[in-house]
């Protein structure tokens, strides 16, 4: 069955690992009648964690999508991973949803990954709320978590649920919006039971309901005037105001429950169906052929446009392309244009999914998320349109990888097969990268953390039966010069018949860091004919490709060609290329060359109690602290650190912070190194060169 845009709701469940996201997702599906019974994560049978790597590790690795029908609405729910290693799947879920539900454990409150997710949602201006989990725990403290949310995010959460007891005395929750109580039934395996609000909770519910009225009035000027004049709003007015206010992000709703006891689920589902914004309240961003960006309101009346948000390779169904429909509708057995590939795409069958189960549909309307199977051209971030529009949607805004390893197949015959699997893995998860570094002669894979990399390598070993070897990647150092110098070189060779002759005189000088290379032709009087100058430049390029200290590329050098000599018969472009290459190398030796190392911008997120240890560790890694901020017990440290010191930082930080810290890293600039550090780099480069020659 297909749903029109106004009847669709898209919700992403996200939060710190271990806060009960998959459990909540599983029990919402049970409450919505999608599954006959709710399974536990430990059983390995949940809808959310169905992949072998998820079942084995008891964590979510991939986003799972399923839908529930409630009050005539279709609620698409994304269950996202909690580990920062799999942030790519969280981001695609945020991109596809109009509301994000962050989970917080009633014992631990707001944790570090939730802080980072909040910041991501802030940058998207995405409406969001909280679900406080495990109220049946003996250490549960609902009000303390609400206070924690207020402290960390400087917002006043609006409770839509009031717990009836906690721990062993937990009985259920009161739905503040609808003034109804929901009671845990027996051992909690049955759905919660609706009933009137117990007398002892009527007064606190009335107080909380007044906060809901205030939040609703914030959503509409006319409602605010009426609220000020009359001091109240009619129920239908309150709902209308809440819808507008939430779409504008004017308030943050808070829910609570104990998912394992099927508690707190119906009030949440009713809120999503009644108050959450429908897709027509949102927009996406398209980029025109001229590079100009423009907002594209989600509109079912306009021609088709859709974004491929995820690619999955299923062993039974083959390649599956997840699409978010932005405008119009997509129909089965139709034709569309893949703008990104400039190709026509034949759409066969269309599907929606309940976890890994596919359900066929005839059409998908704007705002919905569906699947096209076995597409030959579609890949993540591609744009699909009805016509030949030159515009495409902005790609997913993904972070740069922070952890890398060099890999190779233990058996040479498996190299091609290994490469094919890595290409597919990079297509499924766009935070995972695979490339061959010609400079270091290594195949390097990189991602968001050691866990992500290890899972991919384990799948290769298990499914592809390829033994993979790994090692720390080589750093891409550079060489440069520190003073001016000059040299000349004459290439002369007589072999019978035409010989080879070319003389080059040049001067080299340092350039500012980041300028790379500049060539100045200062030849006068035709000492070197114009048609041989390209040969000179090619020779210089070859000389810069391998420096004189450790054979790393040379950067930030100006080369001035000042004089030369040619022979009318024996000179050629090759002669001048060889002469220029040797003249450059000789000049380089005289210009006090030095090594450069890549310096990275590092941002670390840690709990404040680990701040001293992390900063001390960064100092030991030759890091330069640029600044730090602290919000609600979470510290953000900004530093510049040599890349060579960060090759295993994901492992080091996990050890220092007991697995709670995370970080982001990106290249900033190159900086000189000398002394023992430079000597070690040169020795390592020489050892690598010898090994390469032996092989």
Image (cartoon, rainbow, N blue to C red):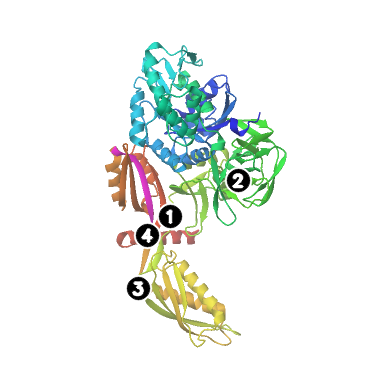
Q: Earlier in the sequence, mark 2 or mark 4?
A: 2
Q: Is residue 198 on the magenta stretch?
A: no
User: Mark 2–mark 1 contact, CB under 8 Å?
Assistant: no
State how far apart marks 2 and 4 are (Cα). Answer: 40 Å
Seen in the image, is 320 located left or right of residue 672?
Answer: right
User: Nearer the viewer's eye, disc 3 or disc 2?
Assistant: 2
Q: What label does residue 483 carry, if any?
A: 3
Q: Quadrant of residue 77?
A: top right
State how far apart marks 1 and 4 are (Cα). Answer: 10 Å
Q: Is residue 522 above or below residue 86?
A: below
User: Mark 3–mark 2 contact, CB under 8 Å?
Assistant: no
Q: Which residues are magenta?
A: 596-608
Q: What label does residue 501 carry, if any?
A: none
Task: Count residues near mark 3 (Cα–Cα under 10 Å), then give few for <14, some for 14-19, many for 20+.
Answer: some
Q: What label does residue 681 carry, if any?
A: 4
- Would residue 632 be visible to someone looking at this image? yes
State how far apart marks 3 and 2 are (Cα). Answer: 50 Å
Seen in the image, is 270 located left or right of residue 640?
Answer: right
Near-viewer residue (14 or 584): 14
Near-viewer residue (30 or 409): 30
Q: Earlier in the sequence, mark 3 or mark 2?
A: 2
Q: Can you identify the residue that label 1 sits on? A: 474
Please state, as top left, top right, bottom left or bottom right, where the N terminus lies in the image.
top right
| Count of all numbered marks drawn on residues in the image | 4
Q: Is residue 605 on the magenta stretch?
A: yes
Q: What label does residue 379 carry, if any?
A: 2
- Would residue 19 be visible to someone looking at this image? no
Task: Count residues near mark 2 (Cα–Cα under 10 Å), then give few for <14, some for 14-19, many for 20+.
Answer: many
State how far apart marks 2 and 1 are (Cα). Answer: 31 Å
State how far apart marks 3 and 1 are (Cα). Answer: 28 Å
Q: Earlier in the sequence, mark 2 or mark 1?
A: 2
């Amino acid at each position: 069955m297909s749903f029109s845009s106004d009847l669709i709701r898209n919700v992403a469940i996200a939060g710190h690992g271990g806060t009960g996201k998959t459990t909540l997702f599983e029990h919402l599906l049970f409450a919505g009648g999608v599954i006959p019974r709710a399974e536990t994560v430990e059983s390995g049978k949940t809808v959310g964690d169905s992949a072998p790597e998820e079942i084995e590790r008891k964590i979510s690795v991939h986003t799972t999508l399923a839908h529930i029908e409630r009050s005539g609405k279709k609620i698409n729910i994304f269950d996202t991973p909690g580990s920062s290693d799999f942030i790519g799947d969280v981001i695609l879920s945020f991109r596809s949803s109009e509301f994000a539900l962050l989970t917080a454990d009633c014992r631990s409150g707001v944790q570090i990954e939730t802080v980072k997710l909040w910041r991501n949602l802030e940058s998207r201006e995405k409406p969001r709320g909280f679900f406080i989990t495990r109220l049946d725990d003996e250490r549960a403290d609902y009000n303390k978590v609400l206070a924690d949310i207020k402290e960390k995010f400087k917002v006043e959460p609006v409770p839509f649920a009031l717990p009836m007891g906690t721990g062993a005395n937990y009985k259920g929750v009161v739905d503040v919006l609808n003034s109804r109580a929901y009671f845990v039934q027996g051992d909690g395996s049955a759905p919660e039971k609706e009933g009137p609000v117990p007398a002892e909770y009527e007064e606190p519910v009335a107080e909380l309901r007044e906060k809901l009225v205030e939040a609703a009035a914030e959503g509409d000027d006319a409602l605010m005037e009426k609220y000020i004049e009359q001091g109240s709003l009619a129920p239908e007015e309150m709902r209308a105001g809440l819808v507008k206010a939430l779409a504008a992000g004017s308030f943050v709703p808070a829910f609570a429950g104990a998912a394992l006891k099927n508690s707190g689920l119906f009030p949440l589902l009713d809120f999503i169906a009644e108050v959450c914004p429908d897709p027509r309240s949102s927009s996406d961003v398209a980029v025109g052929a001229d590079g100009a960006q423009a907002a594209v309101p989600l509109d079912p009346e306009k021609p088709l446009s859709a974004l491929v948000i995820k690619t999955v390779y299923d062993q039974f169904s083959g390649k599956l392309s997840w699409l978010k429909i932005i405008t119009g509708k997509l129909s089965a057995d139709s034709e569309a244009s893949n703008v990104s590939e400039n190709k026509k795409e034949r759409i066969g069958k269309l599907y929606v999914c309940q976890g890994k189960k596919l359900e066929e549909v005839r059409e998908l309307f704007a705002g919905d998320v569906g699947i096209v199977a076995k597409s030959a051209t579609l890949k993540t971030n591609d744009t699909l349109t009805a016509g030949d529009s030159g515009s495409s949607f902005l790609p997913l805004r993904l972070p740069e990888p922070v952890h890398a390893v060099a890999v190779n197949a233990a058996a040479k015959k498996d190299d091609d097969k290994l490469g094919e699997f890595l290409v597919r893995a990079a297509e499924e998860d766009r935070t995972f990268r695979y490339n061959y570094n010609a400079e270091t002669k290594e195949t390097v894979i990189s991602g968001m953390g050691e866990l992500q990399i290890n899972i991919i390598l384990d799948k290769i070993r298990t499914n592809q039966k390829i033994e993979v070897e790994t090692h720390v990647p080589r750093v891409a150092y550079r060489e440069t010069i520190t003073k001016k110098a000059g040299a000349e070189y004459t290439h002369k060779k007589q072999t019978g018949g035409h010989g080879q002759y070319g003389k080059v005189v040049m001067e080299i000088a340092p350039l500012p860091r980041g300028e790379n290379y500049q060539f100045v032709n200062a030849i006068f009087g035709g000492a070197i004919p114009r048609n041989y100058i390209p040969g000179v430049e090619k020779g210089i390029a070859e000389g810069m490709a391998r420096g004189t200290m450790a054979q790393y590329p040379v950067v930030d050098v100006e080369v001035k060609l000042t004089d030369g000599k040619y022979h009318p018969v024996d000179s050629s472009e090759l002669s001048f290329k060889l002469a220029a290459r040797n003249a450059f190398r000789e000049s380089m030796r005289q210009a006090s060359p030095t090594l450069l190392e890549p310096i990275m911008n590092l941002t670390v997120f840690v709990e404040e109690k680990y701040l001293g240890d992390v900063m001390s560790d960064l100092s030991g890694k030759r890091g330069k602290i640029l600044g730090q901020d602290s919000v609600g017990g979470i510290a953000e440290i900004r530093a510049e650190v040599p890349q060579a010191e960060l090759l295993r930082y994901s492992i080091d930080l996990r050890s220092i912070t007991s697995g709670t810290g995370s970080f982001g890293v990106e290249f900033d600039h190159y900086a000189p190194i000398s002394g023992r550090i430079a000597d070690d780099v040169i020795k390592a480069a020489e050892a690598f060169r010898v090994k390469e020659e032996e092989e």
